[in-house]
Amino acid sequence: MPLKFTVLPTGLPPNINDNEYVNSSEGLVSEQLKFGKVFMVGFRASVVRLVFYKLLGTGVVAALVGVSSGTGPDLAFSCALSVGVNAIATYHYHHIWAVRAQRIPEAEAFTRGGGGDQGAKVFLQEYLVDSYRFTDWLCTMLLLQIELGATREFVVKEVPGTPKPVIIKEWAAFLQVCMVTLGGVYRFVTNEARDNTKTSCKSKTLGWIAFVLSSVCFVLAILSLQVGLKSPYEYDDPDVHRAVMQLFVFPLIWVGYPLVMLVARVWLRHLDPERYSEGCSLFKDVAFGTLDVLSKAGLALFVALRAHAQSS
């Protein structure tokens, strides 16, 4: 049975009624409260919507360049992987957009903001949004690693004497899967290793062990791309220069993801473990959205421009 979506015409939480405020004796204060909630729902949805369309647009560009007759096989492969990455990310951002715009399936309607214990509702909504994020990363990080691994192989082929990667791209991609899985243990199994009288010390320890092991997998995956390469500016061939630049810049962007998770953990350190900060949730939307645009949409556009430059 398909899920039914509850669409809020005004974009307001369900406990807010237009006439309630128009005829309210509280006057201006009520109108300001209403405007504030409308603005927050609309603003949060617009942040996600912007990421959605950037991913969609750059994915289309990469697809068109990839099927161009002037694109070589190496870059056509990279374009195809970028299209796959952006398609997966766009699909998940569509669902995150629905959550942030308060268009939530009835089966998940308890997470909708407004009324009741707002901190608990934000906690549940953030849990839902993070589940979409981690599913996205579980698929896209694997493809991104393969794409950059193929770029590393291109450099090895084009520049004699360049050492082969210390870890082949398929195993490095598996490390990315391990990284996201362990990150999921930290986020969902141990609730970001947050203090809770119901959470044993063993559970919190497990959370931090999972985070550290996830970081180790992440570092090894990056090293597989960069060890043995010189500075991009030491390569004379323009396409090799761009390829090496790609191998140094985009993994650097990935470093932002665990940093955002650590900032969120510090932000929530004094909050009830079964509540979530609206400010921290908004920070994550902006930060993760920016990182996704740079690492996924940015890579798709970069590869498309490489292919265009190569064919010119």
Image (cartoon, rainbow, N blue to C red):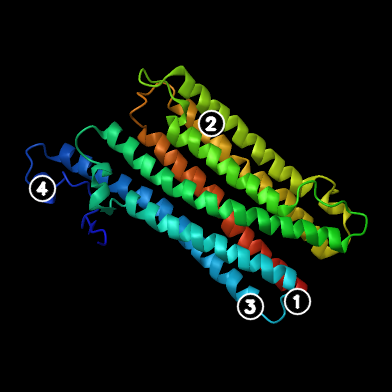
Q: Are marks 4 and 3 in contact (CB under 8 Å)?
A: no
Left or right: 198, with 109 as reference point = right
Q: Identify the image quadrant of the C terminus.
A: bottom right
Relative to the observer, which residue lies in front, 165 or 297?
A: 165
Which kind of residue does numbered mark 4 sit on? Val
Alpha carbon distance from label 4 to label 3: 56 Å
* Farthest residue, direction right: 161
Q: Identify the image quadrant of the N terminus.
A: bottom left
Residue position marked by numbered label 4 in the rendering: 22
Q: Position of residue 54 (x, y in %)?
A: 51, 61
Residue position marked by numbered label 3 in the rendering: 67
Residue position marked by numbered label 2 in the rendering: 262
Which kind of residue does numbered mark 3 sit on? Val
Left or right: 239, with 55 as reference point = right
* Farthest residue, direction bottom: 69
Q: Is residue 85 visible?
A: yes
Q: Is residue 294 visible?
A: no
